Image (spheres, rainbow, N blue to C red):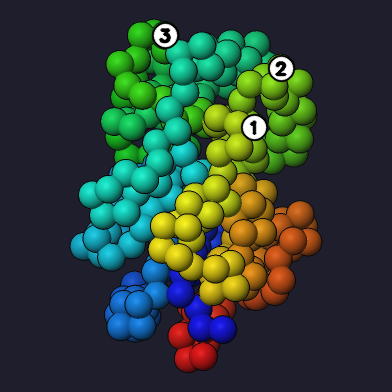
Amino acid sequence: MAIKLIAVDMDGTFLNSEKTYDRPRFEKLLDRMDEKGIRFVCASGNQLPKLKYYFKNLEDRITFVAENGAYVVHGDEVLLSAVMEEEMVQKGISALQSYSNVPFLLCGVKGSYLPKGADQKYADIFKEYYLNIEEVKDLHEIEDEILSFTTVFQVTEVPDVLEYLEEKIGGHLSVVGSGFGFVDILLPDINKGLGMKMLQEKWGITVDECAAFGDSPNDIEMLKQVTHSYAVGNAEPSVKAVATYEIGDNDSTSLLDTIEALLAE
């Protein structure tokens, strides 16, 4: 069956270790996707402005499943904005502060918010992934609609963080590891798979007509939502376990090679 939708995770999957990709080759592939009526979806834990930055001047031709599925945008149309109630925001703040003094971001529709005076080491890490970070004195007085929280730990500590947060707020919020030591908190049942399902229903595309690529646990629901699922070679074992195929790592040409092969079918 011909492919009608191709979705890619960004960090660790579509992007190489230098946070770049072969843009000239991708543009040619995107032209071919447009000619064939194939939808290209960027699905990431990153916020929308950062994703649009990666695809500058191409963003109108791409659908974005941002914030791990909490914010889905096609052109000028917002298809999903999974905003947290104030009570949930406060639960998230309390849980993260009770675990450790590691800084975290509140990610909203208009921007991202970091406590003033946060350790510069963490601020620098966050700035690699978020463009419009605003430092605030009081996290409880942010005037924005909050979509998610994100924080980062040593990779080896992530299982303990997930276990603690799941026990603390798992009945109210969803906690997920996003790779590279990042931990995200969202509304329950919000994930990339939900974003994929929404797009499939909107466009009348079946799971058999979709392909997706990922590397981290926050990609699992998306990979399960398509028949043609690909884990890159550097993917975590849990991701490889659910993917139908394994390809080369994110520093190879394997992902674009695979897309080109899909377009030739």
Taking depth in this image into account, of 11 and 167 the one nearest to the observer is 167
Q: Secondary structure at mark 3?
A: helix
Taking depth in this image into account, of 91 and 125 the one nearest to the observer is 91
- Residue 175 marker: 1
Q: Residue at x 63, y 15 (%)?
A: 95
| Category of crowding for the residue at label 3, using alpha-carbon neighbours closer than 10 angstroms: few (below 14), some (14–19), many (at least 20) | few
Q: Residue at x 23, y 49 (%)?
A: 76
Q: Is residue 52 above or below residue 254?
A: above
The residue at which mark 3 appears reads as 140
Quadrant, the N terminus:
bottom right
| Category of crowding for the residue at label 2, using alpha-carbon neighbours closer than 10 angstroms: few (below 14), some (14–19), many (at least 20) | some
Choose the circle earlier in sequence order: 1 or 2: 2
How far, Cα to Cα, is label 1 from label 2?
10 Å
Side (left or right) of 208 relative to 6: right
Choose the circle earlier in sequence order: 2 or 3: 3
- Residue 76 marker: none
- Residue 168 marker: 2
